[in-house]
Image (spheres, rainbow, N blue to C red):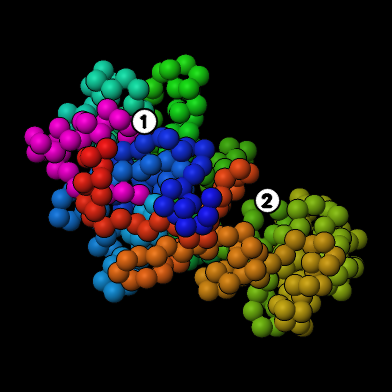
Amino acid sequence: MSETDSVNSPQGPFTGIRVLDLTRVLAGPYCTMLLADLGADVIKVEVPERGDDARHIGPFIDGKSAYFMSINRGKRSIALNLKNAQDRQDFETLLATADVLVENYRGGTLDKLGYDWETLHKNFPNLILASASGFGQTGPYRNKPAYDMVVQAMGGIMSLTGHPDSPPTRVGTSVGDIGAGLFTALGVASALFHRAQTGEALRIDVSMLDCQVAMLENGIARYTATGEIPGPLGSRHPSITPFQAFSTADGHIVIATGNDILFARMAKTIGLPDLIDDNRFMSNELRCQHVEALEQQMEAALTRHTTAHWLPVLESAGVPCGPINNVEQVLNDPQIVARNMVVSAIDPDVGEVRMAGNPIKMSGFADPGNRRPAPELDADRAEILKR
């Protein structure tokens, strides 16, 4: 298959799976983008005239949302008002052909539209329903609205982000939405496997807040083990030392030594072999207890040279390290380019739009550098309804 063919007819393990996408903004669209990247036929069902709210969120390129385009590539669009009788009939015709329905309304909203799980399962027994909402379909918060910022705050991640004594700091990417999108996509894949094995279609209920709790890992472990409430530590790892960003002569470098062997290599490489036999640093536990003293000695050595000097020196010694790249540097990093992690879509109005690629690489399926662009609102109505 040529790259042009793979753009027009994407192939993957979900080829032949039809997904109806009732989602908007980020969590749900990120999930369905992943499914589309893996070959699913994703039909984006949008409200008439306005469409997905993300169409109106910047940044914009010639009046079109780059934000929307970056997370809705490879989908088709139809505009339906689910309170309108004819549109409901068209929607239910599509439901009869679909394998999965994904929605990220506030908890209970789908029920009010008459498409609760019991009704859907009775009328469309083969259909998997995946719901990604702020707080899930059960519990005292089920009807509350939520955005990424809200669940980052409520789920504890913001309490661990930033530097000690700094004001509350949001994680620099939308981990509340993206985490929910990832878990929902995994739920869909699991439900499709279950259906293939048993013939039973399942309901999937993913809460953005639940996903934040699931991502706390070390924070929960520390609190459970010690009873102490964890707080922000800047770039430093709470349980491994040295494992943080250090100053150099012209910037910063990240060094991560996860065991005593790597620590010894690092100490010799930066010209501080005495650290190896220093009683304060002879084990990871001791290094964590004396992290400030160790940081001072390491930075005294590291600030003698530039980041560009230290990176190859440490790498040649087998010490895990890296630069702190900005977004421009990431997009031009040779490893990122080699792994096809920056792809393009040719939008009919604005031309080439670059965006993040699919990190799931699979033998047997192409990973094209060009992708089908995000659809215009209602652009595929005739084709979808004809089929």
At label 2, counting other C-alpha atoms closer than 10 Å, the crowd grade (few under 14, some 14-19, many 20 or more) is some
Binning the other alpha carbons within 10 Å of mark 1 as few (below 14), some (14 to 19) or many (20 upward) gives many
Q: Nearer the viewer, mark 2 or mark 1?
A: 1
The residue at 41%/18% (across/down) is 200
Q: In this view, does 372 lie to the left or right of 85?
A: right
Seen from the viewer's position, the closer of residues 169 and 131 is 131
The alpha-carbon separation of the residues under discs 2 and 1 comes to 44 Å
Which secondary structure lies at badge 1?
A: loop
The image quarter in which residue 137 lies: top left
Quadrant of the drawing holding the C terminus: top left
Is 290 drawn above or below residue 203 in the view shown? below
Q: Which of 326 and 164 is in front in this view?
A: 326
Would residue 143 be counted in the magenta stretch?
no
The kind of residue on which mark 2 rests is Ser
The residue beneath circle 2 is 239
Residue occupied by mark 1: 99
Image quarter of residue 95:
top left
Residue 231 in sight? no
Q: Name the mark on residue 137.
A: none
Seen at 63% across and 44% down, the residue is 363
Percent coordinates x, y for residue 179 in the rendering: 46, 46
**Residue found at x 37% / y 36%:** 18
Q: Specify start and end residues of the magenta stretch as a single range.
A: 75-101
Q: Can residue 285 be seen in this view?
A: yes
